[in-house]
Structure formats: C-alpha cells, structure tokens
C-alpha cells in the first residue's frame, strides 16, 4: 500500500480535497481500509473532470491491483481487474483472438472508472462500455466481497454506480471473436446537409464520430469501419454527401492511424494509442446527451451559441450511444446523441457558459456525462433519471453508514 502524492485529476483541473490518496496492491489491503472507519472513495485513473471521485477521507486507487484478464472457457466473457486500463485489457484480448464491442476515445482510462460513469465510444446499436458488463465484484462497506450478475434484481443499479456501492475489484465483460477495422476521414460536410441527412450520416460505418467548431460545417467525419470476416478490405467512397476524403494520416506517437489501412479493432476504435500520451491535459471537457430522435433540433440550439462557444473551444465531437437498461445510464431507455466539448483551459469562462449551454439543451432533456463538467444541481439530475429512486434505495441498503459518500454523491443521492 502506498501513499500517492499527486493530488490533481489527470487534466490538472480539479484538486482532490481528500485527506489522503492510497494505492492498494491487493484486495486484502483494500479491505483493511474499508473497515478502518474512514470515509472512502474509489479512484481509477483520475480522468474525470469533476469531484465525482472525491471525498473527505481516503481515496483508494485500485490501479495497483495485479492486472488480470481471465477469459471464460466458453470465450464469451472475460474478467478484468478493476483498475486495468481499457487499452491494456484490449491488447490482451486481441492476443487471445477476442474483442470488445467498443472503446472510448482514450484507452488509458480504467475499466471500473469508465464503467462507473457510463463512458462510451460511438456507434448506432452500440451501447456504453458498461452495457457489455455482465458482472461486478464489489468490496462493500462490511468488508465482504460480493458479485452482482446480469439478471440479479440490483444489477441495473450496480454497474453505472458512480463508486457509490463500494470498491469494484473485478469486472466481467462480454467479448466476441476479434475483428478488423479501418479508419477514414472526410472533410467539410456542410452543416445543413448534415442535419438533413443526420440518421444516414451516423450509419455510414460501425462507429461514426464528427468534429465541429460550430462554424457552419462538420470539419471532419471520422468513419471507423468494420471489415467483414473473410473479406480482405472494403471499398470506401471518395465523397460522402459532399464531404471529401482526406489524405491519409498515419499513426503518430499519440494517435491511431486514419489512413484506410486495415488493422486490429483495438488499434482503430480509440482515437489515441495506449503507448502514447494523448495530450498535455490542457483541456476541460463537458458532454451532453440528448435523445437521438431530437438530435437535429438540439444541435441547432447549440449552434445558435456558436459565437460564444468558439473562443473557449478546442473542438466538439458528436457521437451516438445505444439505449440500455442501467438506471443511471445517460442512454437509459433511449438511443442518444452525445455532444462532447473539449474546452480550452478557461475554467471561469467555461463555468459561466455551461448554464446557458445546458439551458439551451434542457428542452431536449439533456443528461450530462457523470465524469465531466456540468452546471446541473441535484434537483435537475433527479428529474432526468426516472430510476434514481431505486438507485438511492440501493445505496442506502448497501452502504447505510455512508462510508462511500462524497460531495458529488451527497448532491445526487442526498443524505
Ligand atoms: C482525454 C479524455 C478522453 C475521454 N474520452 C471519453 C470518451 O471517449 N467517452 C466518454 O464517455 N468519456 C470519456 N472521458 C471521460 C472518462 O472516460 C470518465 O471520466 C471515466 O470515468 C474516467 O475513468 P477513470 O478510471 O479515470 O475514473 P476516475 O475519474 O478515477 O473515477 C470516476 C468514477 O469512477 C469511480 N471508480 C473508479 N474506480 C472505481 C472502482 N474500482 N470501484 C468503484 N468505483 C470506481 C470513482 O469513484 C468515480 O465515481 C474522457 C476523459 C479524458 C480525460
């Protein structure tokens, strides 16, 4: 067990207020801490932008648990230790001829931290990463390990759980036979053409991501296409709705190749390479989910704020996430459009802008990303999640003394 000195999140935008941050190397060490009488919050790789992982006592970092990727005999699931980075689990699965259904843009995030916040990639019909979880092993406030499995009554409240139910020690995920993909980029899709053909654009590939600076165009349309089993490659068009194919971008030391070459799923689904540093962290992120059915109207509402957004923006990315049944999933019950902002490190200006941005999206029932910046308070969140009452009951049953409470949870769950 080691005390960790760095007290900031990955981006350096949030300073943890906890008394101590401790990295554990075994479940026994974690159990000693959970039963010590201290208030505890689980900590992953610290890629969240808000106080979701913070608390008044100890932050227990589980990235030091021995890395483990154990494939089930039927090769349809794999159990991964909680603090494992997605990218490392992905490489090991690929080595064993297996694959995940999707990945987030960044492979450096931990499996437990990402699934706790419903982290997602993109793709029509592709759910959040948490939607592939079939079981979580939890170290509860009583120091006991228990496993909650798909089909158990509390399962839908136990995966996207914001670290409220205890320390997740192992996560079991659905896997499938490995597959191959390619990435191709297209530039300059006029905004009105995009809005007119929006559903068509998002089915142009297995996973579609769009980048815009709210300046009347989609600057880049990034297609991550799955090559069918048995095929060498697939033909890609030179033009999509007027957007032109961009010159190939080979892999850099940070980014995956967008050059039309065919390769393993784990080298094409994320935007960044696990072996590189994605950026210097000079950013703030917020992300807003709206029902896919109202995507065009919601995008128009954001575009109307374009002049105020642009001075503080690196870029915005538009993706999709399929409906699932997790009580706290932003896509609980319906397919969503994900509107993600990577802001410049202008904390005051971004904080001042977010209420107006979220007000513009409020008529569409926007739900904010759990791990990113938002101006919504507990009452607003409560109104957005019809199953939050069930989650609150589950938290009270699992953790009656509030061992795993922190400021974020106090706002959402209430004492
Ligand atoms: C550069 C960058 C790119 C990103 N890209 C995406 C993206 O493509 N898609 C997307 O949806 N999000 C994205 N995110 C957001 C990120 O995926 C989430 O914030 C995610 O929660 C980070 O995981 P983490 O391991 O860093 O968790 P942390 O930030 O450490 O913790 C997040 C939450 O998980 C809980 N938690 C962590 N470990 C455990 C555990 N072992 N047991 C129980 N609870 C635990 C914590 O208590 C906390 O509530 C990105 C963030 C960055 C910085």
Image (spheres, helix red, strand yellow):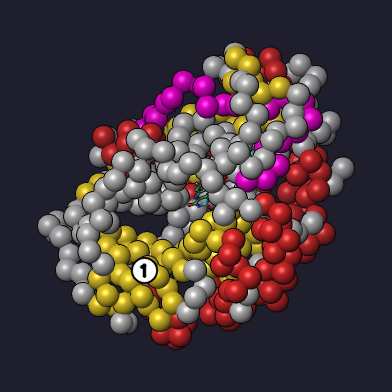
Q: Is residue 210 left or right of residue 181?
A: right
Relative to 357, does residue 55 appear above or below in the rendering? above
Q: Which residues are magenta?
A: 49-72
The residue to which callout 1 is attached is 221
In magenta stretch: residue 51: yes
Is residue 240 shown to the viewer in this render? yes
**Depth order, front residue of 245/405:** 245
Q: Quadrant of ligand 1?
A: top right
The residue drawn where x is 31% and y is 77% is 243
Point out residue 191 in the picture as x, y percentages from the top left corner.
Answer: 45, 81
- Dividing the picture into quarters, in which one does residue 12 lie? top right
Q: Is residue 400 left or right of residue 77?
A: right
Is residue 142 shown to the viewer in this render? no
Point out residue 291 in the picture as x, y percentages from the top left corner.
Answer: 58, 71
The residue drawn where x is 48% and y is 41% is 280
Quadrant of the image for the C terminus? Answer: top right
Q: Residue furthest left?
A: 232
Quadrant of the image for the N terminus? Answer: top right
Q: What element does badge 1 sit on?
A: strand
Q: Is residue 374 left or right of residue 319?
A: right
- Dividing the picture into quarters, in which one does residue 355 lie? bottom right
Relative to 8, does residue 327 appear above or below in the rendering? below
In magenta stretch: residue 155: no
The residue drawn where x is 57% and y is 54% is 344
């Amino acid at each position: 067990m080691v005390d960790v000195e760095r007290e900031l999140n990955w981006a350096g935008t949030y300073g943890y207020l906890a008394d101590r941050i401790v990295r554990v190397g075994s479940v026994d060490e974690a159990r000693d801490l959970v039963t010590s009488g201290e208030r505890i919050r689980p900590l992953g790789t610290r890629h969240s932008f808000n106080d979701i992982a913070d608390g008044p006592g100890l932050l227990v970092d589980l990235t030091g648990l021995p890395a483990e990727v154990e494939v089930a005999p039927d090769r349809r699931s794999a159990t991964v230790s909680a603090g494992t980075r997605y990218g490392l689990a992905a490489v090991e699965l690929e080595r064993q001829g297996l694959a995940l259904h999707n990945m987030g843009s960044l492979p450096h995030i931990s499996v437990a931290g990402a699934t706790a916040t419903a982290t997602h990639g993109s793709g029509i019909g592709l759910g959040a990463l948490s939607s592939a979880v079939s079981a979580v092993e939890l170290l509860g406030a009583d120091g006991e390990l228990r496993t909650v499995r798909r089909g158990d009554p509390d399962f839908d409240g136990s995966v996207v759980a914001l670290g409220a139910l205890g320390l997740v020690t192992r996560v079991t995920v659905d896997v499938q036979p490995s597959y191959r993909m390619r990435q191709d980029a297209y530039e300059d899709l006029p905004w009105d053409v995009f809005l007119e053909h929006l559903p068509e654009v998002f089915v142009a590939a297995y996973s579609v991501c769009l980048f815009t600076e709210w300046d009347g165009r989609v600057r880049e349309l990034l297609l991550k296409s799955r090559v069918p089993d048995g095929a060498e490659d697939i033909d890609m068009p030179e033009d999509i709705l007027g957007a032109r194919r961009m010159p190939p971008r080979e892999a850099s030391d940070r980014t995956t190749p967008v050059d039309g070459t065919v390769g393993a799923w784990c080298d094409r689904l994320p935007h960044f390479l696990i072996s590189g540093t994605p950026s210097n962290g000079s950013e703030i992120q917020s992300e807003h989910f709206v029902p896919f059915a109202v995507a065009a109207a919601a995008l128009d509402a954001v575009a109307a704020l374009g002049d105020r957004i642009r001075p503080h923006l690196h870029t915005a990315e538009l993706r999709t996430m399929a409906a699932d049944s997790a009580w706290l999933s932003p896509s609980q019950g319906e397919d969503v459009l994900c509107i993600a902002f990577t802001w410049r490190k202008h904390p005051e200006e971004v904080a001042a802008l977010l209420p107006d941005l979220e007000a513009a999206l409020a008529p569409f029932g926007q739900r904010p990303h759990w791990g990113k910046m938002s101006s919504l308070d507990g009452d607003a969140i409560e109104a957005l999640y019809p199953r939050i009452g069930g989650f609150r009951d589950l938290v009270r049953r699992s953790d009656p003394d509030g061992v795993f409470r922190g400021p974020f949870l106090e706002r959402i769950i209430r004492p």
